[in-house]
Amino acid sequence: MVFRVLYSENLKFYTRTRRFQVILPLFALLSALEPLLVLAGVVPKPPDVYAFTQGALAQFSEYVLLACAVLAGDAISRDFSREGYFTLTQPVRRSEIMLARFLSAFTAALIVLLVIVGIGVGFSEYMYSGVVPNIIQITLVGLLYAASLTAFVMMFSSLSKSAALSIVTAILVLIIAMPIVQSVVEFLSGVEPWFLITYASEVISNLAQQSYPPHLVTERFGSRTIYLYSPGTLEGVAIIFGYLVVSGLVAWAVYSRKELK
């Protein structure tokens, strides 16, 4: 009963914030923009449903990332501000509070994700009378990715007292730092960046292709060999799941021991 109340109240908190009320229509508009331009004849129509879906998923990871970062950025940090004097002094276990915060933030992000997927599926059906065969797998991996990002952002939230700082830090790490590290490791060192969730998220767009890309492609540029890695489906899912478990455990370890000052 207590957990249900915590989850319900936290979900109401997220869905009533200006952040959610801006993100949901904004991402819905951005997801529908290119298909609408195609239907209006402004941009050429993709040749098949595979090309259309790949285009629709091009920014999918970034949308999910931003949604999770903005919505879950203060999931824990607000308990170590003035709000914590009320929350943490109640006879409720921190494990219940944290799980309710995680599930409610994930649910809010999930609503955004499903709207994006629904828009893509709707335009795909209208324009091509069908969807790519792997649409269910794409959606399921997308859900796991959203859950892992929520846990990852909550880990930063547990380390900071400032909601804004935890949100900005998570976004900088995921959008700027990880892609830079991936480029350096992959292109310059020839090493597979299997330890990055941004690399693993490529599974989502790979599943939209007519034939899944090979794990490794090499290209020669003069005397230099460039290595281009692509995660396998099981590999990508394992990496994403690993981020969910490790981030959740770190967030819990910090949250359960951190004192309110």
Image (cartoon, rainbow, N blue to C red):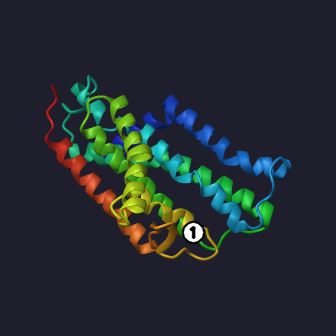
* Residue 1 seen in the figure: no
The amino acid beneath tag 1 is Ile
- Residue 110 x, y percent position in the rendering: 50, 50
In the image, taking residue 27 as reference, residue 184 lies left or right, namely left
- Residue 137 x, y percent position in the rendering: 53, 69
Along the line of sight, the residue nearer the viewer: 61 or 178 = 178
In the image, taking residue 218 as reference, residue 154 lies left or right, namely left
Residue at 35% from the left image edge and 62% from the top image edge: 189
* Residue 137 seen in the figure: yes
Along the line of sight, the residue nearer the viewer: 93 or 62 = 62
Disc 1 is placed on an element classified as helix
Residue at 34% from the left image edge and 41% from the top image edge: 6
List the single residue furthest toward the front: 223
Q: Residues within 10 Å of mark 1 (few under 14, many from 20)?
A: few
Mark 1 lies on residue: 136
Q: Quadrant of residue 192?
A: bottom left
